[in-house]
Image (tube, helix red, strand yellow):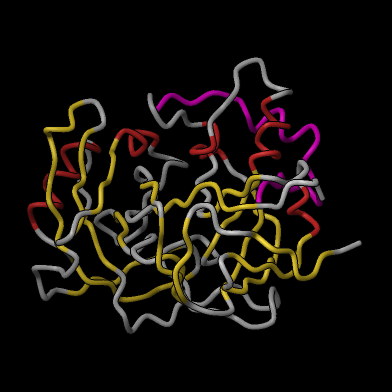
Amino acid sequence: MTDTPATLSEIWIYPVKSLGGVKLNAAQVEERGLQWDRNWLIVDENGIFLTQREHNRMALIGVAVHAGGLEIFDKNNPQNCIQVPFDPVTDQEKSIKIWKDRLTACTVSDEADKWLSAQLQRKVQLVKLPESSSRLSPPGLGSEQKRVSFADDFPFLLISEASLADLNSRLVHPVTMDRFRPNFVVAGTLPFEEDSWKNISIGGINFEVVSPCERCVVVTVDQQTGHRSPEPLKTLAGYRRSDKKIRFGQNVIGLGTGTVSTGDSVLVIEADR
């Protein structure tokens, strides 16, 4: 531990999986994750989900949250946008597949589908996670399985500023935190100190740190240009590889609900020695 108390320095949500993130000053902690985080998903004609792993053009689409819903926009031309209400305007359902999970989601609007299809240059649909969804975090990790949104596996992802600084000290061209798509960014720790955490409290809400996050090619996509390069995955592979997996950041589940805000204290309740 450092002499400086750890604090929550940034909060991020990604309302539409694999599109741009939204930086918040405060957020509601729910069982599935932060409010609105990864509640929407882009799928192809067969209901298979799309991500930046194969479609790096998705990095060029931004998202903003307003009182009535989302604004999805072209980062290079923000006036080119579409409004998406929180509640779908259609009553149609669609069978979708995200990783090994098959579930029924709600289509959103024909307008959103047309706009996104034009941006991504392929026919796609925007769907929303229904409240009734019982998609769960992986078994055997954490004290209990939790319901999750369209996140890959877990409701929350945490990374420290010090860990990113350590990585950047090894890179010719530093990268920004948005490559790694965290929900919680923590200041005031040693590099990779979060690897040892088991139970923490953020703003009085308890969380369980359940597993390191396995990184993929998404981190090689520049979130401002959409360009892909070997870094930082190449450098991470040189010193953050374990069991043939490249690990950076920690997956977290919530043990309570409430509000977290930037500046909140991050208290370590239990950690490996």
Q: Quadrant of residue 256?
A: bottom right
Residue found 35% across the figure and 58% down from its top: 48
Q: Residue furthest top?
A: 172
| Percent position of residue 22, x then y | 36, 47
Left or right: 24 as drawn, with respect to 166? left
- 43 or 264, which is in the foreground? 264
| Percent position of residue 270, x then y | 79, 70
Q: Is residue 190 above or below residue 56?
A: below
Residue found 14% across the figure and 40% down from its top: 81
> Is the C terminus in the top left, top right, bottom left or bottom right quadrant?
bottom right
Does the stretch in magenta take in 242?
yes
- 260 or 142, which is in the foreground? 260
Q: The magenta stretch spans which residues?
A: 226-249
Residue found 54% across the figure and 23% down from its top: 229
Q: Is residue 201 above or below residue 110?
A: below
Residue found 61% across the figure and 26% down from its top: 231
- 12 or 213, which is in the foreground? 12
Total marks drawn? 0
Q: Residue furthest right?
A: 273
Q: Is residue 194 above or below residue 61?
A: below
| Percent position of residue 41, x then y | 32, 58
| Percent position of residue 44, x then y | 28, 53
Does the stretch in magenta take in 77?
no
